[in-house]
């Protein structure tokens, strides 16, 4: 696939099915992620690959976080939390590893980690895979971060769901650059 085609036609796809990306496909996903802009060559990211029974374990972590926040959570809400990681055969957690640096502020490092997530999305699309980048309250929950093994200087950038497209791939909405670009003088 041509680079511009991937950039212009990538869409988020929520309906994903087995099989998970192959080892060769994953290698390309992560190689693309590692090409993110990176001022100072800090590599302010890392990735957690979650599949199989680990998805159920993550679902239990999500339910535990929900109960910690809301002890009166309904059984339906807990079931929904447990089912979140089951939306796709593979989930990649993109983690920003923020570092103190005299020339590269943490905000810039966080953006770099976000670009690495975008690289995964583009590489998935280029390989014909489906992908969806999600955040939500679990991405910002310290109980979840601790359960994932994140250090105090790390934070979840997003959960990327990956798999094969279920149904037809939709087209991206038509947007006009002129609606978003202004000339500054």
Image (tube, grey):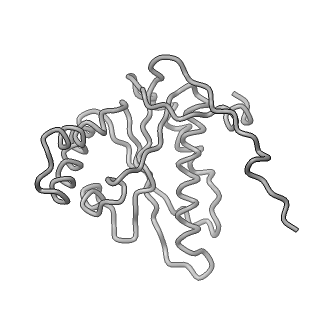
Quarter of the image holding residue 75?
top left
Quadrant location, the N terminus: top right
Of 40 and 89, the residue lying toward us: 89
Which residue is rendered at x = 73% and y = 30% of the image? Answer: 2
Residue 81 in percent (x, y) is at: 24, 43
Which residue is rendered at x = 44% and y = 42% of the image? Answer: 160
Of 73 and 147, the residue lying toward us: 73
Which residue is rendered at x = 57% and y = 61% of the image? Answer: 111
Which residue is rendered at x = 15% and y = 54% of the image? Answer: 67
Quadrant location, the C terminus: bottom right
Residue 154 in percent (x, y) is at: 40, 65
Please, is residue 96 above or below residue 4 in the view? below
Horizontal side, residue 56 vs residue 14: left or right: left
Horizontal side, residue 69 vs residue 20: left or right: left
The residue most toward the front is: 179
Residue 50 in percent (x, y) is at: 33, 41
The residue most toward the right is: 185
Quarter of the image holding residue 92?
top left
């Amino acid at each position: 696939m041509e680079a511009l085609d991937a950039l212009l036609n990538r869409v988020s796809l929520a309906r994903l099915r087995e099989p998970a990306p192959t080892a060769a496909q994953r290698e390309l996903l992560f190689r693309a992620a590692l090409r993110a802009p990176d001022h100072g060559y800090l590599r302010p990211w890392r990735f957690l690959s979650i599949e199989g029974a680990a998805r159920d374990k993550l679902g239990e972590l999500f339910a535990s976080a929900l109960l910690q926040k809301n002890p009166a959570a309904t059984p339906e809400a807990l079931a929904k939390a447990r089912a979140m990681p089951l939306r796709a055969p593979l989930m990649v957690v993109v983690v920003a590893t923020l570092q103190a640096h005299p020339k590269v502020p943490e905000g810039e490092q966080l953006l770099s980690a976000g670009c690495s997530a975008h690289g995964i999305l583009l590489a998935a699309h280029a390989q014909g895979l489906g992908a969806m980048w999600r955040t939500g309250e679990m991405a910002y929950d310290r109980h979840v971060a601790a359960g994932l093994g994140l250090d105090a200087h790390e934070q979840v950038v997003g959960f990327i769901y990956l798999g094969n497209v279920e149904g037809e791939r939709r087209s991206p909405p038509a947007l006009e650059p002129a609606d978003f670009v202004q000339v500054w003088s």
